[in-house]
Amino acid sequence: MKPQPLAAGISAVLLAAALTACGGNSDSGGGTGAGDGAVTLTYWASNQGASLDNDKQILTPELAKFTQQTGIKVKLEVVPWTDLTNNTLSAAVSGQGPDVLNIGNTNAATFQSTGAFYPFDDAALQKIGGKDRFVESAFAASGVAGTPPTSIPLYSQVYALYYNKKLFSDAGLQPPATWEDLVAAAQKLTKPAEKKYGIVLPGATVNASMHFAYIFSEQNGGSAFDQAGKPTFTTPGMLKGLKQYVDLISQYHVMNPSAAQYTDSAQAAGDFARGNAAMYMAQTSGINVLTQNGMKPDQYGIVPIPAPASGTKISSFVAGTNISVFKNTKNLDAALQFVKFMTSDAEQQILNKAYTTQPTVKGASASFTDDKEKLDAFTKILSDYSKPLPIVPAIQAFQANVGGAAVALIARAATGATIGDADVKAALEEAQQKMGAS
């Protein structure tokens, strides 16, 4: 899951009003009836692979298979994550969107609140095989609990720490078991004169920065929201968690300052694949990205992102990509058939293996790698070291504001500035104030 922030300044209230005005009778959005009488669905697929072309290569034969089985054609558009969320928002407001699209599961509650998406009530869920087919942790991120979800889990992912086996072996190091171990290893492996660093992270990527702020705050006993869904960004655990992230470049100097400009996780993956960084944190799909960068699976290992010795062993949130149907589609039956196809046991096995992600249905086993060690590591992270993000509509604003705060702090640290506790607190106070205005 690689969600991006909503367009700034648009509130849920204004969005709901716009949706009331746009209705569901647009002639320019969604699929069409082809001249030969066949239905054509428009599908916005998120960029899951190493490139947009990689996605097209993976999806095109599967969509052809769907057409052969049903007679329903699919017009595919692969959309970068940097554009997908704002494109989806615009489509929700205008009523001119695709029939079916992917969303990051962290966006599920946010987009559900717009009223623009088809609700999967019990009858609709039965049309795609029933709720019980899905892995519970994945389905829990499909919408607000107690309401019909407006998205269905498609691909699951979790974060892990990737480490370069040779660099660790040559330095006499073991994979880190605690955050203190990680920092010590990163310091030993950092050689600025050779442009070699202990760790690399995509410092200018808002969504990834939010992910790490969340994971590290949970390790330190923090929580981004209280039980009522109110933001609690300035609690001690949140402050410690964000500072833990920023300290990698500010205090310990184990990350190349140029990584503060990386706006995409693939840039960090490239540094790791070239041996310019000994560690990096990425989701399950990082395996595919590293392969595309020429790195062989036996060159790196995977362990849970370590927590401080006195902290909580949280290594990831339950990340993933969901599939949704626009409520105003003129081809609802065809769209539901497509969702059923994409979430079938057979397609889940094929697509999740291709994308090195984890299936969201119980009938398909994880097969995103032939490396049993990595498969077991990711499976254990998902079952034992992962915690879902809060399922609240404000989660997208949390991403924009806290992720943006982290990006700004990393950028300052990259210039040589020392980031202290007061700087982190001020950044999180500003992020929380923005929540009231968003």
Image (cartoon, helix red, strand yellow):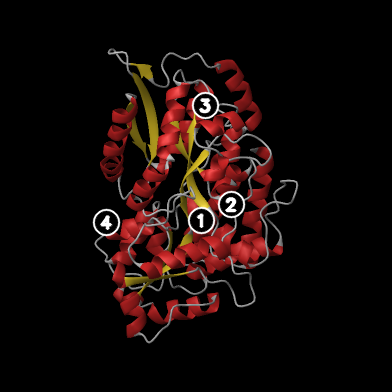
Please tell me which residue lies in front, 415 or 24: 24
Please tell me which residue lies in front, 152 or 69: 69
Dot 4 crowding, Cα within 10 Å, few <14, some 14–19, many 20+? some
- Of tags 2 and 4, the one toward the viewer is 4
Q: Quadrant of residue 116?
A: top right
Earlier sequence position, callout 1 versus callout 2: 1
Q: Are marks 3 and 1 in contact (CB under 8 Å)?
A: no
Residue marked by disc 3: 92
Q: CA distance from mark 2 to mark 3?
A: 25 Å
229 shown above or below 124: below
Q: CA distance from mark 1 to mark 2?
A: 8 Å
Residue 310 position within the rendered picture, expressed as x and y whole percent measured from the top left: 64, 76
Residue visible at 28% across and 33% down? 64
Residue 106 position within the rendered picture, expressed as x and y whole percent measured from the top left: 55, 45
Q: Are marks 1 and 2 in contact (CB under 8 Å)?
A: yes
Residue 109 position within the rendered picture, expressed as x and y whole percent measured from the top left: 60, 39
Say which quadrant the C terminus sits in.
top right
Residue marked by disc 2: 402
Earlier sequence position, callout 4 versus callout 1: 1
161 shown above or below 88: below
Residue visible at 65% across and 67% down? 220
Secondary element under disc 2, as helix, strand or loop, is helix
- Please tell me the numbered disc located at residue 209: 1
Residue marked by disc 4: 292
Residue reaching furthest right? 228
Earlier sequence position, callout 3 versus callout 1: 3
172 shown above or below 224: below
Dot 1 crowding, Cα within 10 Å, few <14, some 14–19, many 20+? many
Q: CA distance from mark 3 to mark 4?
A: 34 Å
Secondary element under disc 1, as helix, strand or loop, is helix
